Image (tube, rainbow, N blue to C red):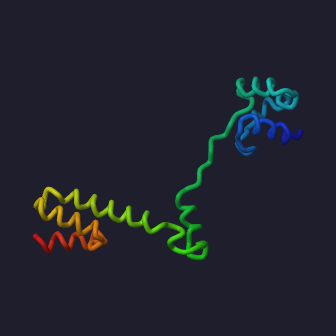
Amino acid sequence: MNLSSKRDLIARMLGVGKERIAFDPERLEDIEDAVTRDEIRALISQGAIKLKPIRGQSRRQKERRAGQGSRKGKKGARMGKKIRWVRQVRALRGYLKKVKPNISREMYWELYRRIKGGEIRTVARLKEAIGGAK
């Protein structure tokens, strides 16, 4: 028995893909006899028709597709300058906040301004600046 048309109808009713529809093998005759949407809804509530859980995609698979050969557009098109700048400044300010109790208030604000001005661009350089000033 071919239940593909029923599967299509159920998928449209529930707003999911056809692959997620699972039929109870013991109730296939009931599913085949169901004609109206109401009958199908009744079979869903009885458990003759079930939805499979969503299958995700692992982060690893997504990373594998992001190699140099798959990239299109300039570097700035994939991640804008401003987003990169904001992430960098937030990382630096976060580290500076972490070491704040170990340094003086004046030094904290001097480093804060140097980060804002772009003089200190990496956490490694920030560590050097803290170590050199101590």
Point out residue 68 in the picture as x, y percentages from the top left corner.
Answer: 56, 75
Residue 64, quarter of the rendered image: bottom right
Q: Residue at x 74, y 32 (%)?
A: 49
Task: Identify whether 114 is placed above or below 28.
Answer: below
Name the quarter where the C terminus is drawn.
Answer: bottom left
Residue 46, quarter of the rendered image: top right
Q: Residue at x 80, y 39 (%)?
A: 7
Point out residue 125 in the picture as x, y percentages from the top left corner.
Answer: 25, 73
Task: Identify whether 20 is placed above or below 34.
Answer: below
Name the quarter where the N terminus is drawn.
Answer: top right
Q: Residue at x 38, y 66 (%)?
A: 85
Task: Identify whether 19 is placed above or below 39.
Answer: below
Point out residue 43 in the picture as x, y percentages from the top left corner.
Answer: 76, 26
Say whether residue 59 is left or right of residue 102: right
Q: Nearer the viewer, residue 60 or 102?
A: 102
Point out residue 73 in the picture as x, y percentages from the top left corner.
Answer: 58, 73
